[in-house]
Amino acid sequence: MKTSAINRRNFLKTGGSASVLLALGFSVPAHSEEVLLHKIPQNTLGLEFSPYILIDDTGKITILNPRPDMGQGTYQSMPALVAEELEVSMDQIHISQTNGQGKYGSQLSGGSSSVRTRWMPMRKAGAAVKEMLIQAAANKWQVSSEECYAKEARVFHKPSGKSFTYAELVGDASKLDVPKNPKLKDPKDFKLLGKSMPKPDVPLKVTGTAEFGIDVDLPGMLYASIERCPAIHGKVVSFDGAAALKVPSVKNVLKAERAMPHKTVETVAVLATSYWAALQGRKKLKIKWAAVDNNTLSTEKFSAQMHELAKQEGHDFEGNQGDFAKAYGEAAKKIQATYETPFAAHAAMEPVNATVWVKDDSVEIWAPVQGPDGTIGELSQYLGLKPEQVKVNVTFLGGAFGRKAYLDFVKEAAYLSKQAKAPVKLIWTREDDMTQGPYRPAMLSVLEGGIDANGKVTALHHKIISESIQKQVFKANITGKADGWAEEGVGAKDSPMAIPNIRRSYLNASTDLPILWWRSVYASTNVFGHESFVDELAHAAGKDPLDLRLELFKDSPRFVKVLETVAEKSGYREKLPAGKARGLAIARSFSTICAHVFTVAKTADGIKIEKVVSVIDCGMTVNPDNIKAQTESNLVYGLTAALKSPIVFADGAVQQSNFHNYPVLRINEIPQMEVHIIENQEAPGGVGEPGLPPVAPALANALFNLTGKRQRKFPLELV
């Protein structure tokens, strides 16, 4: 299998290498589940459309991956959806990355959306091409297409055993109409989907042939390193770049800008012919920053602001039921608790970087971005160009977790390229990444629950207080109403609990600290409070936390199945020896349900997390091995956020700057992990994020069962 970037030149080369080409694309109309398939005329390739399937008469089969791969596996999953229906093996195809052009819907890797939104379109595209090839073969043999079948890039005639390769059929097939509703395979006949298999990008990454953004190299390219105000929003009063210009290979020092969605700030950049020179020159800059009110960006002040807001009446989300106030007032037992989660950095292994070449009437970008289509939109607007004047080459992403869909770094490189009139490669340092944001927003969950005399939970209110990503990043007006995104993981759809009186409400806490989605977004914080509080309700009602959840989710069989499975696999009901305890949590996010059971133990050195058993129901699957890997990754990421240092802004700057004071979980700290996947025929859900939300509450519940101490704020203490 080979990989290549897909761009206009490569499209034309692909078409030009063969006399005939069959190319098929699809579109998904807005607000519709219908998939429209259409052929791509050979003479339009590279001009307007980005077909997902290209087959030429030399036998080359190219499948395009429409979702950038940041480690979540789209480089395999997207082509596999096509290959399954096309009846080709993964080693028979070439994989190319889309470049943001075309009319095929979103190309954003985010929201664990790739497989669940492209499960049908990609399969239908593959099935349609297969039917066209089979019909072409049937026409050649003058037989019914019912007598023919496809296998391993060939079409066979059942009675005679004759066969044609796809390459021999592509000319005739390209003249046929595209079937509107091609027949899809029965899942029982899948050869690729649902089977664990090696990921095709792994050899590329092991051998160093995979290109990440940080690897891009262009002739005449300048490297950039940028000094930004420690207070993030500081203004440049003056700067002296004389010492920087004396560093060999440094070519220029200039005032620049960082254009964030909510604010544009001034910076100072050093340009050089090597990154080392740019970095050394940056260290010699002398900059005077305008004074900034430290209180406006203090995480301590922001926490106090959220707690003060908690006293106010919230704005209701949609989907509330019953009369919470009445039921709570009549409850035999009333339980209240407040849970708080801090700001968090994305800390992707590859810091953000971009190479941009702004010319007179166009711009070309090489970068690890999560959405090439969004990159075209934002950069064309930023530079005053038409979208067709912007070209994006998407590389592999060395981790992202949401950060690389926030395009301030691409705009920084574009600004510098425009000034320098040359291609510019900008690389953020780890310290830049930690101290400049954007961050997961800190959040406060205020919970109230009512229990009747029979131990039944009759009322629940979850008040969510946070800054709004919709408001800060997308300029949404949420004045006097709830931010519909902010109930993620605990809303009526994600948490269909059988409680007769449920209220969910929201209050906006404003901050100028740049915020953004972070792996599992609001669910990563909401579920901590929600699932910890369910345990509190269980203890108050005198019930086992598992039994209460089975009662609350009695009308949701998939939740029940996950709970029963995780209880069985973890031995939840088995008695543990003294000094050990288990804790449970479950959550649905991105159309997937996941539950964890943690086992913790007291030791001479403190509390040890011995084991975590996970069960995930994500519907039909592409690669079970990848699902297990993503769930394990979520466990590590979630435990890091729950146990390690938060982002703290104080004394005019973020206090964390690198992994020495913003550590990640070390290998010796990782517990034994056991992941089980529920097999069913439900529609696919997300995989890259749903394993994270129940991590912290499951651990917190285990710690309470071990120590009797309820922890309601990060970092959780293992003492």
Image (cartoon, rainbow, N blue to C red):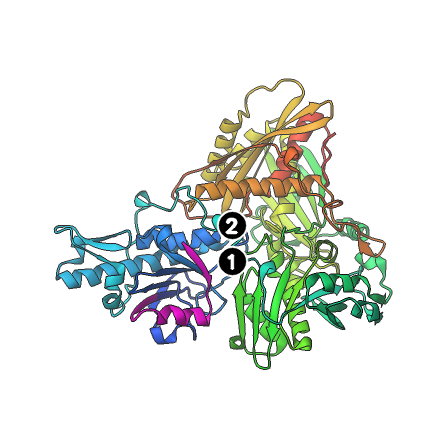
Q: Secondary structure at mark 1?
A: loop
The answer to which quarter of the image holds residue 19 is bottom left
Task: Give residue 201's position: percent from left, percent from top.
Answer: 48, 51
To which residue does mark 2 refer?
207
Residue 37 within the segment the image draws in magenta: no
Q: Secondary structure at mark 2?
A: helix
Q: Which residue appears at 60% of the width and 44% of the height?
A: 502
Front one among 266 and 4: 4
| Mark number displayed over residue 68 | 1
Tell me the quarter of the image containing the C terminus.
Answer: top right
| Mark number displayed over residue 619 | none
Sequence order check, earlier mark of 2 and 1: 1
Give the magenta range.
1-23
Q: Residues within 10 Å of mark 2 (few under 14, many from 20)?
A: few
Report whether 85 appears left or right of 692: left
Tell me the quarter of the image containing the N terminus.
Answer: bottom left
Residue 22 within the segment the image draws in magenta: yes
Number of dots carrying numbers = 2
Q: Which residue appears at 12% of the width and 62% of the height?
A: 142
